[in-house]
Amino acid sequence: MNVRASATAQGGAVLVVALVMLLLMTVLALSGISASQLEFRLAGNRAEQVRAFNAAESALRNVERRLADIAGSDDLRGASCAGRQGLCVLQVDSVRRVDEQGAWQWSWSSDPGEWWGKAQNAIDYRGADGQSGFDRTLRQHAAYFASDGDGLNLGNLDEPQLRTDYYYADVYAGSDDGRTPVLLQSVFARRYVN
């Protein structure tokens, strides 16, 4: 038996096995790169969602603060936000409707980005200082929906009455590409003496 011939034949087999191992390691490395790219995108989307939520929450608190600052019964509510600055108070019929079965349906439910983008539906949030800019679209409004002081009290006509008006404070935060929209809503009760 020739030892040299056997070693030469095995040398070719080692080369094939080494090439297969190298190919497997390349495939594993590529799948690891793909997984890390996916994780990077997920982390970026999550960070964008958190920024949108924080901006929307800031705008929501601004609406609530402005509602609380209104003195007396005149909140300047109307049917449109066009031309308004600071705070826009709409009638509830402008933001929700009742269908044939009696269920509420929000006006923005079919296409939030388009509805919130219209000037009659909301105003831009410019920060607490009124001049800040944001990377995303931030729109806000309040919608009056009820009051507990509409009845007539003949027992004490000359005394001031404590009243409470109820509002939906609504905020939309979205980006230009339509990704990660955030809609926040709170119910706000404003008490005042009439």
Image (cartoon, rainbow, N blue to C red):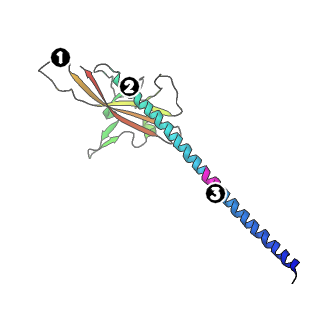
- Mark 3 or 1: the one toward you: 3
Labels 2 & 3 near each other (Cβ < 8 A): no
State the residue lying farthest toward the top.
158
Residue that numbered label 3 is attached to: 31
Seen from the viewer's position, the closer of residues 191 and 175 is 191
- Say whether residue 185 is left or right of residue 44: left
Residue sitting at x 60%, y 53%: 35
- Is 186 contained in the magenta span? no
Q: 66 or 177: nearer the eye?
A: 66
Q: CA distance from mark 2 to mark 1?
A: 28 Å
User: In the structure shown, which secondary structural element does the residue marked by tag 3 occupy?
Assistant: helix
What amino acid is labelled 3 in the image? Answer: Ser
Q: CA distance from mark 2 to mark 3?
A: 51 Å
Label 3 to label 1, Cα distance in Å? 77 Å
Q: Looking at the picture, which amino acid does disc 2 mark? A: Arg
The residue to which callout 2 is attached is 65
Residue 142 picture location, percent across and down: 36, 30
User: Splitting the image into 4 quarters, where does residue 154 fall?
Assistant: top left
Q: Which residues are magenta?
A: 30-36
Expressed as whole percent of the image width and height from the top left, the position of residue 183 reads 42, 38
- Among numbered discs 2 and 3, the one appearing first in the sequence: 3
Give the residue type at disc 1: Glu
Q: Is residue 174 left or right of residue 2?
A: left
Judged left or right of residue 182, residue 47 is right
The residue singled out by tag 1 in the image is 159
Q: Earlier in the sequence, mark 2 or mark 1?
A: 2
Horizontal and vertical percent for residue 74? 30, 21
Q: Identify the residue shown where x is 82% and y is 72%.
A: 11
Label 1 element class: loop
The quarter of the image holding the C terminus is top left
Return the residue found at the far left: 155
Q: Main secondary structure of the magenta part?
A: helix
